[in-house]
Amino acid sequence: MRKIHWLPAAVLILALLFSGCAAPAPVSAPAADSGAAETASTAPGDKEPVTLVFWHHWGGNRVPLMEEQIRRFEEKYPWITVEMTLQPWENRLQKILTSVAAGEPPDVTMLGRQDLPAFVEQGALMPIDDLMSAAGITTDMFYEAEINGAIYNGQTYLLPLPTGGGISVLWYNQDMFEEVGLDPESPPQTWAELEEAAKALTIMEDGELQRVGINPRLNGLHAGISFLGWLHNNGGQWISDDMRTITWNSPEGLEALQWVVDFTNNINGGVEEVDAFYSQTGEWENGPFYTGYEAMQTNGTWELFKILEFAPDMDFDIAPIPYGPQGDPAKRGFVYGGWGYVIPEGVEHVEEAWLLLEFLTADMDGGCWFLQEQQRPSPWIECNEQPESSADNPYWDGFLEVLATDQVIPVSPVQPAIEEIVIQMQEEALFGVQTPEEALA
């Protein structure tokens, strides 16, 4: 059995939350003018040319959409030129912090909402409440579960895009359901029903996985922290409302972690077999769901755009994620982070940076169009109410149903370290180093 060596979780939690949660030293950066943006004309005669630096992570088949979106922005605001850069995933957070410290930040950058508290504590982001007010943008224009992740200590620092929610969609292959005698019109609604469906759909030969019914280590969150999603899906929460007490060692938490372990062992052949199986599958167009090696998955609304491109002949459908025994079907979904756009501290052209941020998130020809092209819902409610958003999308009502069930998984200024602790607990339980009860203690 693989051995894992970790520091005790309790020691790390105490160090992080009770002595180490004081705000980190602020990043040294020039102060920026954070006054309210003026209402800008699209064809001003007195505007000096401005060049904005914009960083994002929209790779793959979203690259041409981003190029068109920026072309539209420059057409609307002809005095602004945008230098857009697709940033690599590695070291993305450190690169932003380093640029702020050096006094040369991008004017607008993409940022995960789960990283926002840490960035605010380091003085790296500009609050945008005054800019929003001047532009007539209010928080109630967005889904509550989406905008809540953009607010920290009573101030707004980010506008969300795309939906961080909607990771709670159950995608399933209808042909595979029919193949094993399951009704594709009645997808599983509870954990127990999900187990029964997975047992029928999983194919094992000589102790080796040939097809996975579903992998509970992957539920829209990355494999190491999927426990957080199942915990909230089962009516629990990982931290108290005042963000001072760890609460995952609860009946709901124990039940969630035990369920993931039992499912992995009893249905999928154990974590080592699961890892071996997925090590042989591909990514993007060669991913297991698109190539017929996975019958169900829980993932985001972005999957529609990928399925239509990578597996256009697949007969599939969607449903809300199944909920646990202690869960509430009306609150079965969860939002953990999700993307958005921010203005770092130290930018020179605040007004123009805001115009770009607004265009990327709350403009019909910008962020709304970008998501419509992918047939994905927007965090901006008005966008989803446009006929173009739901046109030719038979899954639209299902997406909105999922959004309505979403709850926010809280994040703290030390969330990356918290994630490491969750990974420790989950992996030790899965590999049998500790029982779930011991891992959560």
Image (cartoon, grey):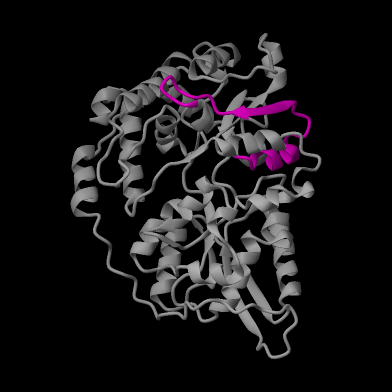
Looking at the rendering, which quadrant does residue 98 occupy? bottom left
The vertical placement of 148 against 346, above or below, is: above
Can you give x and y, in whole percent of width and height, for residue 215 in the image? 51, 26
Is 311 part of what is drawn in magenta? yes
Quadrant the C terminus occupies? top left
Q: Which residues are magenta?
A: 300-328
**Quick check: 236 above or below 56?**
above
Q: Is residue 286 visible?
A: no
Give the farthest residue toward the top.
181
Q: Is residue 173 visible?
A: yes
Residue at 25% over, 41% down: 245
Residue 248 in the image: above or below residue 40: above
Using the rendered view, name the quadrant where residue 140 is placed.
bottom right
- Horizontal relation, residue 143 to residue 100: left or right: right
Is residue 286 in the magenta section? no
Tell me where residue 403 appears, x and y as whole percent: 58, 39
